[in-house]
Image (cartoon, grey):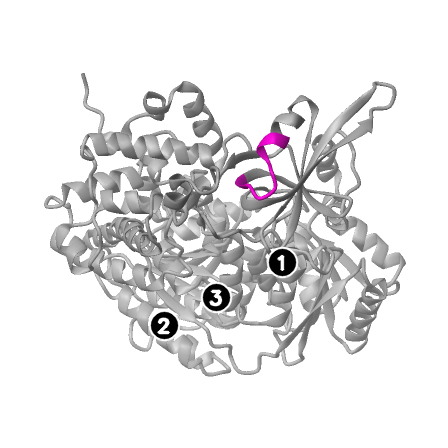
Amino acid sequence: MEYVPALDEPLKKLLGAATAKVMAEHMDLHTVGDLLHHYPRRYAERGELTTLADLPLDEHVTVVAQVADARVHTFNRGGRGTGQRLEVTITDGSGRMQLVFFGRTVHFHQKELLPGRRAMFAGKVGVFNRRLQLAHPEYKLLDADSGTDAVRAFASELLPLYPACKQLESWTIEQSVAIALDSMAATEWAGLTDPLPPALREGRGLTDLPDALVKIHRPRTKADIADARDRLKWDEAFVLQVALARRRHADTQLPAVARRPAPDGLLTAFDAKLPFTLTEGQRKVSAEIFDDLATEHPMHRLLQGEVGSGKTLVALRAMLAVVDAGGQAAMLAPTEVLAQQHHRSITEMMGELAQGGMLGGAEHATKVVLLTGSMGAAARRHALLDLVTGEAGLVIGTHALIEDKVQFHDLGLVVVDEQHRFGVEQRDALRGKGKQPPHLLVMTATPIPRTVAMTVFGDLETSVLDQLPAGRSPIASHVVPAADKPHFLDRAWERVREEVQAGHQAYVVCPRIGDEEDQKGEKAGKGGGAKKKASPEDEAEKRPPLAVLEVADRLRSGPLAGLRVEVLHGRMHPDDKDAVMRRFAAGDVDVLVATTVIEVGVNVPNATAMVIMDADRFGVSQLHQLRGRVGRGSAPGLCLLVTEMPEASPARQRLGAVASTLDGFELSRIDLEQRREGDVLGQAQSGARSSLRMLAVIDDEEVITAAREEATALVLADPALTGHPELRTALDALVDKDREEYLEKG
């Protein structure tokens, strides 16, 4: 019979089919290892009562509290006789809450829940008569009759409270974990592989793995919990960093053509044309990129920069350096609007240097080609010919660049703009078009905290542009509470008119288009069900998001009547989109009502105001991106965040944070703290549970930094991990086939 390592044992064998099924379906827990790595969310102490004052509405919770009062009430059931209801008031010293039970079990619960009794209660928090309530909660009594030895022994015990769900309470998980721990202890933890090399573990003063698992689930003291956390964080950080270090090491073994710009060539001519000097940050980042391009293995660099910090200019200089060295460079953009915008701005910046082979072209000029899916057959044939012959040194395009028909003469550099919008396969397909692996520069305007960059993009070297070019104007941001103060919204439209009267332009952004496709989705999404009175927050969320087409009509006939209002969205014909953007850029449109198609790369310096409708429907980083479209010229920018959410709601707090700072890195921290990390290895595409259960990429910077150093040194000494079989086993468990491919391609 095949030996199953202890942690890989199916829960079905340990806990029985029924419990194992619930754990698999509702908690994504399948093996003994999954269960032992399902750590307590927090701990309650026997004498310590949890705070009832901070309970979240409509969420399943577990609370530790004392019964203050319990009473049975008889009520009339409207022609069906009378019924009984048990109302129990519980307290934790800081707040009170009501429990309610109906039906035949009332007297059983009344006998159990006597005043003074302490218990764990679990259920969904609701409100009745303006009081917090748990209806028919599950509960487990914690104290036996007072004065017994058992109570004294139990008094100081730390009680683990686990992340739970409606089908599985915290204490059921606790009992299951206890069975798993006892089972492992009985076999002396046979089959348990410890991923940390002994020298690292001892050098860092970390406890061994069995000890850490016992301490996290059955702590005797708070020091036990701290010991266990320190150790388990290292497991996650180290194994992940080893996976990334191996990826970086493999990259250094790949061949690539070194691309050094020719002296007094295209790059020199371009720099001489610039009407401004580069910022210190742009010079520093360019130097890092040029050093990478000069090596004989592929560059893998992430360039992140604040909105408007000049990333496109830095990327263009890298592309020109590659053309100087005899190669071609391709820029991959996520939308046609952005590809056309890049093509327009790059050809404008280069002038006669972009007219290679044409009358009036400069001495070192090259050709700059645009390739998108909507191009006509003749223009497309022309572009493809320019690429395969090498006539075009630069190509800017959408996913159309990835198609099989597209062949390059000598692809030396791939620049991916807003990389989070591309699947791994798309990037990989473009990189595969070089005779040897091309250099790769990934750009994002979404600021990423350093520790996130070390995990999510840990196989890329990182360059940061955090300095705005001189002449960029400040952007004032304000929340407009449309439901609470409708006159604030009226004033917002007055401000837009004032900006237009001063010779400027404005954007209005909506979450939805509002065409037939949208309406089909809405109808499909509408369901029946019992109706209950919704809170203002629920009402605001249930209303369909505001739509571009409807808002544009309302503005044309209402507050912005007489202004030139046009729309832009992703389902327009590409030629129409381009025509609208050209008119807006030329100043022939006063107000552009758009979806987030304008989120990245769109550069109209004369646009000074932006009104974001239903701003609570967007993420923090997305709002920051959108706001970056204004204030790009010498006049100050204005961004108004319109919402119907009530003042105390988390959505309003999020909008308040965006309005209070222009620091994208600070906002990305807030965004991450609210969304939690997700799966740092397989991103959203894998759909898997997060591989980080103990490590928090925002809070554990020291652990991640140290783990990266240790992992880099270990992989350098032993790339195949032949001397570390346990680490290899842990790596196989973390980096399954899908994630391995993600790292291979990423």
Q: Residues within 10 Å of mark 2 (few under 14, many from 20)?
A: some
Q: Which residue is at a point 37% across and 67% down the rendered structure image?
A: 463
147 relative to 474, above or below: above
* In contact (CB < 8 Å): disc 3 and disc 2: no
Is 390 or 285 nearer to us in this picture? 285
Q: Which residue is at a point 74% across and 51% down the rendered structure image?
A: 548
489 relative to 578, above or below: below
Segment colored magenta: 110-120
Q: Which mark is residue 598?
A: 1
Q: Which mark is residue 286?
A: 2
Measured in 3D between alpha carbons, the distance from the residue under mark 3 to the one under mark 1, in whole angstroms, is 28 Å
Q: Residues within 10 Å of mark 1 (few under 14, many from 20)?
A: many
Q: Secondary structure at mark 2?
A: helix
The answer to which quarter of the image holds residue 329 is bottom left
**Residue bearing the label numbered 3:** 355
User: What's under tag 1, amino acid-wise?
Assistant: Ile
Percent of width and height locating residue 415: 41, 58
Percent of width and height locating residue 457: 37, 55
Q: Which mark is residue 586?
A: none
Q: Secondary structure at mark 3?
A: loop
Q: Can you see residue 339?
A: yes
The answer to which quarter of the image holds residue 87 is top right
